Amino acid sequence: PMDVAALARILDHVGDGAELQLAEFETILSRLKLAQLLQGRVDTTDLRSFEGDGKNSGMVAIDYNAHTYSTLRLVGSELRKYVFGHRPLPRGPGEAPLVRWVHMDPFDLTLLLTLMVKYSLH
C-alpha cells in the first residue's frame, strides 16, 4: 500500500506547469488499472469458460454507422488489443463516425469492470 506522503510526492508532479498534465496522469492510472484487471485473463488457456461455444457467446464488439459495420470477437490477445486500443476512424471525411456496441455473454464482472475503466463509466 502507498502511504499519504508518497502519494503527495507523486501529485506534486501533476498539474499546470508540472511534468505531467492531469489528463496524462489519468490516462496512466486508467491503463495501469486495465492491466491489473486483465492480469491472468489474456493469453491463457483458461479462457475456455468465457469463450462459450465459439459461436454465440463471449464478448463481441460491433463498430457501425449507416454505411458500414465490422464485428470483432474479443478473446485472448484480441481482448488486449481492444482494451488498450482505439475505435477505428471513419474511412473518409464525409463518413459518419462509428458507434461501438459491446455484447457480453455470459456475464463476467471483471470484464464489466474493465469496460467501466476503459470508457470512464460510473
Image (spheres, rainbow, N blue to C red):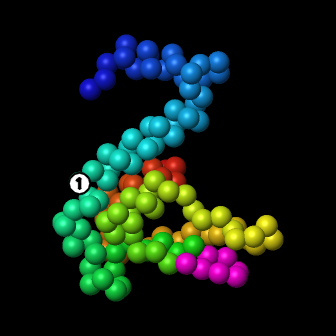
Residue 105 higher or lower than 43, as above or below: below
- Callout 1 secondary element: loop
Query: Residue at the spot x=62%, y=69% of the render?
Result: 99
The percent position of residue 3, horizontal first and vertical second, equals: 31, 19
The percent position of residue 76, horizontal first and vertical second, equals: 31, 66
> Residue 57: in sight, yes or no?
yes
The percent position of residue 112, horizontal first and vertical second, equals: 38, 60
Label total for image: 1
Magenta span: 64-70
Residue 73 higher or lower than 114, as above or below: below
> Residue 121: in sight, yes or no?
no
Q: Residue furthest left?
A: 46
Query: Residue at the spot x=43%, y=60% of the render?
Result: 81
Q: 74 or 4, which lies in front?
A: 74
Query: Residue at the spot x=55%, y=58% of the render?
Result: 86
Kind of residue at badge 1: Gly
Q: Which image quarter: residue 44?
A: bottom left
Is 60 situated left or right of 55 in this image?
A: right
Q: Which residue lies furthest to the right in this view?
A: 94
Disc 1 target residue: 40
Circle 1 packing at 10 Å, graded few (<14), some (14-19), many (20+), is few
Query: Residue at the spot x=60%, y=28% of the render?
Result: 21
Q: 111 or 46, which lies in front?
A: 46
Is 36 situated left or right of 7 in this image?
A: left
Is 41 situated left or right of 62 in this image?
A: left
The percent position of residue 110, horizontal first and vertical second, equals: 32, 57
Instruction: Indicate whether residue 108 is drawn in magenta.
Output: no
Instruction: Indicate whether residue 65 is drawn in magenta.
Output: yes
Quarter that holds the N terminus: top left
